[in-house]
Image (cartoon, helix red, strand yellow):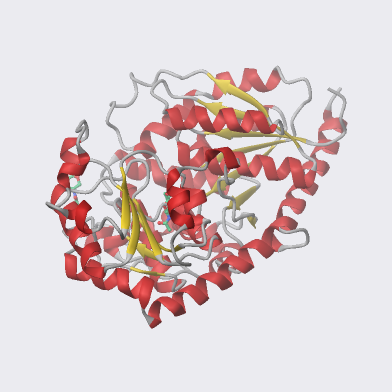
C-alpha cells in the first residue's frame, strides 16, 4: 500500500464504552487529518453483541483497517470475577506477543501506538518498532487522579475512604472520600497496585489524549501540563468524541412518538447497558415520575436480583402504565440513545453518568439528573452537578441507599419545569456550542490532533533514518 501518510495503530481493549470512543478517534484521525490508521480490537471470549455491531458498522465506513486479535487466556492469572481494572490490564499485558507479531505483519510500518486506559501494559510493544506511545482516556478528572495516585500514595496515610478531608489534586475539584473510584477503595488489594502501575506507565508515554475539550476542563488540563506532580507528559484534549448518530433506517416508533410531543418536554431515563436498579428503587422511580406529571421515555431493565426475568413490567406499581398512558413510554428493549437525545422533544436525561452518555447529553444540549450506579461514576456525577452546573443529583448517593419518590419528583420538576432547569439548559447549550467549536477545523481539539499528527510525521522521518 503506497502512501506517504504516517501510519498509527490504535489498540482497543475489550468493552463497548471504550470501543465507541476509540473508533471515533480513529475516524477523526483519518477523515480530518489524513492519517493511515490500523485498528486492532482485542476480543474477549465472552464479548458482547454490542461490540461486534460497532465493529460491523465501523467496517462499513471503510476509513480504518480493522483487525481483530484473538482472545487471550488469562484464567491462570486472575480469578474470573476479578475487578475490571485487574482483568483488562492483564488481558492487555498478555496480548503483547500477538500484537507485536500483528504489527510486524503490517505492510506499512506504523509510527505511533495508541492504547486506551487498560492498554498501558501493551505500550512496551511500541519500543520494538521505534513507535511513539499514546494513551487515550475518557475524561480529565479521573486521568488527573491516576497520574497523581503515586503521590497520594506517599502523602496520604490510611485508607482514602476514611479520610476526614477530601483528596486534593492540583487544578481539580477535591475528590470526596466517598467519591473515590473502585480501585482506590482498599489499599491492600491488588487492584490498587494495578491502578498505581497504570499511572506510572502513563507517565512513560509520549502523550495523553483526553476525550474532553479545552473549555470543558480548563484548570485541570492546565494543571496536568504545568504541575510536576502529574509527571509532565504532554496532554492533548481531543474531544468530544461520541457515537455517531445511526442511519435514518434505524428510526423506531419511539422516535415517531417523540415527534408528537412538545419541544423539550420529555425526560429520557436510562442507566446504560449494564445498569440495574433494585425492585424497591424501581417502585420509587415510577411513583416519583407519576407525581411529577412530566412526559418520559424509560428504558427499564429487570432489577439486580432478577436478571433473567421475562416480565420486567411486573415490577412497576399496579396500574402505573394505565395512569401514565398519555405521559410516557416504558421500553424494555434496546433504545437508540443518540437519536433520542438528539430529538427536539427531549428536554432532560436521567442518567447513570457514564462519560459517553454525559458527553452525548451535553452535545445535544440536554441537562441531566445524575444518578451514578457504580463508584467510578460518582466523580462524573459530582463534576456534572457541581463543577459544570448541568445536572442535579440526589442528596443520598444511589449507590448507598434508596432515593425516595418525593425527591425524584422534585428533581424531575427541577430539570423539566422550573427556573433552575432553565439555567442548566442555558449552561448546557453553552457547553454544546463550545464542544462543537472545538472539533471544527481550527478549533482546539482539531488543532490538538493536528499537533499529534505532526509528531507522527517527525517520528516517521526518524524511523526512516534508523531503518537500514
Ligand atoms: C481491605 O481489605 C482487607 C482484606 O483484604 C480488609 O481486612 C480491610 O478491612 C479492607 N479495608 C477496607 C477499608 O475496606
Ligand atoms: C465516568 O464514567 C466512566 C465510565 O463511563 C469512567 O471511565 C470515568 O472514569 C468516569 N469519570 C469520572 C469523572 O468519574
* Residue 177 falls left or right of residue 33: left
Task: Note whether 143 is above or below 172 in the view shown.
Answer: above
Task: Note whether 408 is above or below 273 in the view shown.
Answer: below
Q: Quadrant of the C terminus?
A: top right
Instruction: Please tell me which residue is depicted at 58% across the width and 44% down the height of the picture.
Output: 135
Q: Position of residue 248 (x, y in %)?
A: 59, 42
Instruction: Please tell me which residue is depicted at 51% across the width and 70% down the height of the picture.
Output: 428
Task: Note whether 349 is above or below 76 in the view shown.
Answer: below
Task: Note whether 94 is above or below 275 in the view shown.
Answer: above
* Residue 126 falls left or right of residue 79: right
Instruction: Please tell me which residue is depicted at 34% across the width and 20% down the height of the picture.
Output: 75
* Residue 199 falls left or right of residue 394: right
Q: Furthest residue to the bottom?
A: 419
Q: Position of residue 298 (x, y in %)?
A: 32, 52
Q: Position of residue 160 (x, y in %)?
A: 28, 59
- Which image quadrant for residue 157? bottom left
Amino acid at each position: 500500500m503506497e502512501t506517504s501518510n504516517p501510519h498509527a495503530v490504535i489498540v482497543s481493549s475489550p468493552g463497548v464504552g471504550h470501543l465507541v470512543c476509540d473508533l471515533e478517534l480513529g475516524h477523526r484521525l483519518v477523515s480530518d487529518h489524513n492519517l493511515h490508521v490500523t485498528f486492532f480490537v482485542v476480543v474477549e471470549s465472552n464479548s458482547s453483541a454490542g461490540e461486534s455491531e460497532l465493529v460491523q458498522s465501523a467496517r462499513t465506513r471503510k476509513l480504518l483497517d480493522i483487525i481483530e486479535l484473538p482472545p487471550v487466556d488469562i484464567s491462570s492469572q486472575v480469578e474470573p470475577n476479578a475487578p475490571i481494572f485487574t482483568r483488562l490490564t492483564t488481558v492487555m499485558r498478555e496480548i503483547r506477543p500477538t500484537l507485536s507479531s500483528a504489527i510486524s505483519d503490517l505492510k506499512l510500518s506504523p509510527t505511533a501506538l495508541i492504547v486506551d486506559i487498560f492498554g498501558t501494559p501493551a505500550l512496551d510493544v511500541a519500543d520494538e518498532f521505534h513507535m511513539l506511545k499514546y494513551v487515550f482516556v475518557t475524561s480529565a478528572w479521573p486521568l488527573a487522579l491516576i497520574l497523581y495516585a503515586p503521590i497520594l500514595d506517599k502523602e496520604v496515610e490510611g485508607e482514602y475512604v476514611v479520610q476526614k478531608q477530601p483528596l486534593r489534586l492540583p487544578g481539580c475539584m477535591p475528590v470526596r472520600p466517598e467519591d473515590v473510584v473502585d480501585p482506590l477503595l482498599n489499599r491492600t488489594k491488588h487492584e490498587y497496585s494495578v491502578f498505581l502501575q497504570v499511572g506510572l506507565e502513563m507517565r512513560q508515554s509520549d502523550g495523553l489524549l483526553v476525550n474532553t475539550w479545552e473549555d470543558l476542563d480548563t484548570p485541570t488540563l492546565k494543571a496536568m501540563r504545568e504541575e510536576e506532580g502529574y509527571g509532565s507528559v504532554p496532554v492533548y484534549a481531543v474531544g468530544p468524541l461520541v457515537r455517531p448518530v445511526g442511519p435514518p433506517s434505524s428510526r423506531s416508533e419511539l422516535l415517531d412518538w417523540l415527534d408528537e410531543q412538545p419541544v423539550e418536554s420529555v425526560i429520557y431515563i436510562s442507566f446504560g447497558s449494564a445498569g440495574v436498579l433494585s425492585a424497591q428503587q424501581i417502585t420509587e422511580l415510577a411513583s416519583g415520575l407519576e407525581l411529577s406529571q412530566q412526559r418520559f421515555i424509560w428504558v427499564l431493565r429487570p432489577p439486580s436480583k432478577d436478571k433473567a426475568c421475562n416480565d420486567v413490567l411486573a415490577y412497576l406499581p399496579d396500574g402505573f402504565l394505565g395512569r401514565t398512558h398519555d405521559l410516557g413510554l416504558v421500553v424494555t428493549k434496546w433504545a437508540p440513545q443518540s437519536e433520542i437525545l438528539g430529538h427536539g422533544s427531549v428536554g432532560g436525561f436521567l442518567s447513570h453518568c457514564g462519560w459517553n452518555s454525559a458527553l452525548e447529553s451535553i452535545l445535544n444540549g440536554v441537562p441531566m439528573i445524575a444518578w451514578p450506579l457504580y463508584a467510578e461514576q460518582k466523580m462524573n456525577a459530582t463534576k456534572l452537578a457541581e463543577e459544570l452546573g448541568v445536572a442535579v443529583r440526589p442528596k443520598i448517593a444511589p449507590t448507598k441507599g434508596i432515593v425516595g419518590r418525593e425527591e425524584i419528583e422534585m428533581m424531575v420538576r427541577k430539570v423539566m419545569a422550573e427556573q433552575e432547569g432553565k439555567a442548566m439548559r442555558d449552561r448546557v447549550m453553552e457547553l454544546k456550542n463550545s464542544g462543537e467549536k472545538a472539533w471544527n477545523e481550527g478549533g482546539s481539539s482539531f488543532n490538538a490532533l493536528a499537533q499529534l499528527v505532526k509528531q507522527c510525521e517527525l517520528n516517521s522521518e526518524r524511523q526512516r533514518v534508523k531503518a537500514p
